[in-house]
Image (cartoon, helix red, strand yellow):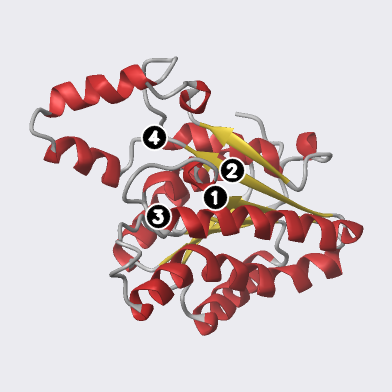
């Protein structure tokens, strides 16, 4: 595989499983040294061990993105091991499903800290490092729910809309330091929540077929599909891409709902 990210290092949040793990694998395969920043020590260490077993440079840092102390510690560990920070991928987050009239303030704060505030805190502590280097790429994993949503996705969709605003502001305010910011918005991807959704359906096979048929490509995405896009956006080949959202959804958002 190409080594277009050789001599670069990446800090990827929520990289112990799912889309985050797919991103970490693709970045490592293309030459980047990777810190798996993950709250779950079992999946985080497993992901790092797997990358090292394949001959890549990787380490695990236990990071809860709701904690500024954890984030500072994780980035410090990354710098101690790899020397610089070229790529920040804000991937960690979780779907939320609340009634806006019933949700408590504490539940709101938890959701925002997990899906929006944590991404900003990672940027807060990565930006000074990138500014000193006068180079860096921040890739924020948003969602198709940032611009179009479904019933019962509040306030996840609200936070993901905020990720797009965060991305635009970073691109404008830090471009003079040669720092780029891009949002990536996946649709249906084969992750645990999606597999759980299928398994809980009255007729799992029929639900899988229904969801596949929503897509022009007649299939859902894989974590490595998102990872491949992120690896490209992190590379010099994407050096003129910043301040925008790239949708990766198999064409589902091109479909008129009927």
Q: Nearer the viewer, residue 143 or 100?
A: 100
Question: Residue at (41%, 20%) from the top-left corner?
Answer: 215
Q: Which residue is mark 3?
A: 49
Relative to the observer, which residue lies in front, 246 or 77?
246
Crowding around mark 1 (Cα neighbors within 10 Å: few <14, some 14 to 19, many 20+) is: many
Q: Locate residue 181, reporting x and y percent.
A: 72, 52
Q: Earlier in the sequence, mark 4 or mark 1?
A: 1
In the image as oriented, which residue stretches furthest toward the bottom?
69
**Is residue 195 placed above or below 70 in the rendered structure?**
above
Which type of secondary structure does the marked residue at label 2 adopt?
Answer: strand
Q: Which residue is mark 1?
A: 141
**Residue 113, percent from left and from top:** 47, 72
Q: Residue at x 87, y 55 (%)?
A: 178
What's the distance in space between the residues labelled 3 and 1, CA to CA?
24 Å
From mark 2 to mark 3, how far is it between C-alphas? 27 Å
Distance from Cα at disc 1 to Cα at disc 2: 5 Å
In terms of sequence position, does the residue under pointer 3 or pointer 1 come before the other?
Answer: 3
Q: Earlier in the sequence, mark 1 or mark 2?
A: 1
Q: Position of residue 2 (x, y in %)?
A: 65, 30
Q: Secondary structure at mark 3?
A: helix
Q: Is residue 221 visible?
A: yes
Residue 76 is left or right of residue 172, and the answer is left
Q: Which corner quadrant holds the N terminus?
A: top right
Q: From mark 4 to mark 1, how far is it between C-alphas?
A: 13 Å
- Up/down of 91 relative to 248, above or below: below
**Mark 2 lies on residue:** 184
Comes first in the chain, label 2 or label 3: 3
Determine the image quadrant of residue 212.
top left
Residues packed near mark 4 inside 10 Å, few (<14), some (14 to 19) or many (20 plus):
some
In the image, residue 19 lies at what x, y percent? Answer: 43, 45
Q: Nearer the viewer, mark 3 or mark 1?
A: 1
Q: Residues within 10 Å of mark 3 (few under 14, many from 20)?
A: some
């Amino acid at each position: 595989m190409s080594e277009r990210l050789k001599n670069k290092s990446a800090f990827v949040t929520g990289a112990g499983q799912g889309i985050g793990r797919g991103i970490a694998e693709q970045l490592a395969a293309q030459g980047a040294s990777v810190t798996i920043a993950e709250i779950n020590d079992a999946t985080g260490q497993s992901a790092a061990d797997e990358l090292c077993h394949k001959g890549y440079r990787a380490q695990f840092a236990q990071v809860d993105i709701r904690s500024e102390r954890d984030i500072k510690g994780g980035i410090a560990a990354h710098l101690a091991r790899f020397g610089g920070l070229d790529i920040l991928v804000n991937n960690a987050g979780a779907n939320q499903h609340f009634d806006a009239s019933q949700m408590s303030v504490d539940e709101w704060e938890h959701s925002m800290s997990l899906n929006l505030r944590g991404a900003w805190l990672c940027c807060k502590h990565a930006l000074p490092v990138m500014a000193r280097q006068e180079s860096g790429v921040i890739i924020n994993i948003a969602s198709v729910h940032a611009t179009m949503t479904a019933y019962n996705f509040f306030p996840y969709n609200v936070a993901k809309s905020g990720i797009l605003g965060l991305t635009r502001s970073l691109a404008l305010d830090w471009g003079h330091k040669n720092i780029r910011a891009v949002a990536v918005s996946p649709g249906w991807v084969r992750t645990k929540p999606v597999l759980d959704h299928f398994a809980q359906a009255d007729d799992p096979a029929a639900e899988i077929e229904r969801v596949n048929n929503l897509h022009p490509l007649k299939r859902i995405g894989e974590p490595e599909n998102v990872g491949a896009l992120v690896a490209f956006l992190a590379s010099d080949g994407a050096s003129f891409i910043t301040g925008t959202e790239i949708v990766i959804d198999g064409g589902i958002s091109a479909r008129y709902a009927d």
